[in-house]
Image (cartoon, rainbow, N blue to C red):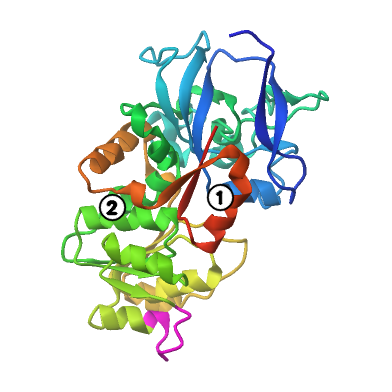
Amino acid sequence: MQFPLETEALVVETPGEEFKLTPIIIEELRPDEVLVEMSYSGICHTDFLLQKGLLGGLIEYPAIAGHEGAGYIRALGAEVQDKSLNVGDPVLLSFTCCGTCEPCKENRRSRCDVFPFINLTARRWPDKSSATKLADGRAVGSHYFGQSSFARVSAVQERCVVKCAYPDDMAIYAPMGCGYQTGAGTVLNILKPRPYQTVAIFGVGSVGFAALMAAAALPVKSIIAIDVVERKLSLAKDLGATHTINPSDAETQLSVVERIKEATGGRGADFAIDTTGIPSVMEQMLDCLAPGGTAASVGVPPPVDISVNVGAFFLGTKNWVTVTEGDSYAPDFIPQLIDLHRQGKFPVERICKVYPVAEMEQAISEMESGVVIKPIIQF
């Protein structure tokens, strides 16, 4: 592969602007990078944080989002350590990490000491360089989560790469690298509910559905899905929810917390997961817990305070954890999820839809309206 390499990507010029298909030039491939030609990329709400400028000044614009890529290796850097990788291999892409801190050495990559900076700046760590520029010579951030998969071709950090054993299903497996492993990993790696326990899931987008399907695969006693979109709740029932709650339901005077306790015989939920990041919803997640229960925050909240009765929380021996990427070691966990799918226990095809890259805006619109849970763009 010859450099500089001309290709194109969905570039965000300045915060708040739309994703625009724009010519780009990849100038180089570093020794620890893998050149990947993207076939697909999932669309995630974290991509909108970049697009809307909501990452607290971490991003230098212009920049390229995308962090659920899937495609084929076109070149390998000279110092790539995984000798099982070859040009032409089908791969799925996940997040990256520094590889040198203590959590990374223990394969706890989602707890990397510099996780926000190495994944959310869209630049290489630690020198903040980029492999890519625009036609006018300006550098463009092209390393979002180490991959920036909203590009036809990208210089990808080696630690993002997971080989895909089933390339014919690459489209539906693309979101394994973030959304699916985040939701499923929260259940399978962190909470680990037992068959007699109850799980409440606040927000059934792609992360919430992944958590729901993972809980149903175990299985657990009951799964309570909470969302304001009835279509999502109907699908949640099909995929394993035993109870559904729409907070906007005008036919009941009971609060969401009261309805969860009603569904659990008065105890509350043994486990509660919030995928929304909405402060008021997080308070409901904490309030609905049964004695000894555990709450898991997965959705990214704004930097605001919430109200918690600490005394009651303590006396109830309750727990609250935050979870990034499902606490997953992607090279092991993504194949586990694919195996669950092959067994019919993780039916991700029920929640996704593939769009040509030219229909990006339609994909976003249908995601935001709840018509589609997980949109996937195809290059």
- The type of residue carrying mark 2 is Ala
Q: Quadrant of the C terminus?
A: top right
As helix, strand or loop, the secondary structure at mark 1 comes to helix
- The type of residue carrying mark 1 is Ala
Tell how many labels. 2
Say which residue appears at 34% left-offset and 82% top-offset.
259
Does 190 appear in magenta? no
Quadrant assignment, res 295: bottom left
Q: Nearer the viewer, mark 1 or mark 2?
A: 1
Label 1 close to label 2 by CB (< 8 Å)? no
Q: Which residue is mark 1?
A: 363
Q: Give the side of residue 312 with respect to residue 215, left or right.
A: right
Query: In the displayed structure, would residue 198 be above or below residue 172?
Result: below
Q: Position of residue 83 (x, y in %)?
A: 38, 12
Say which residue appears at 61% left-offset and 31% top-offset.
151
Q: Which residue is mark 2?
A: 214
Q: Is residue 73 visible?
A: yes
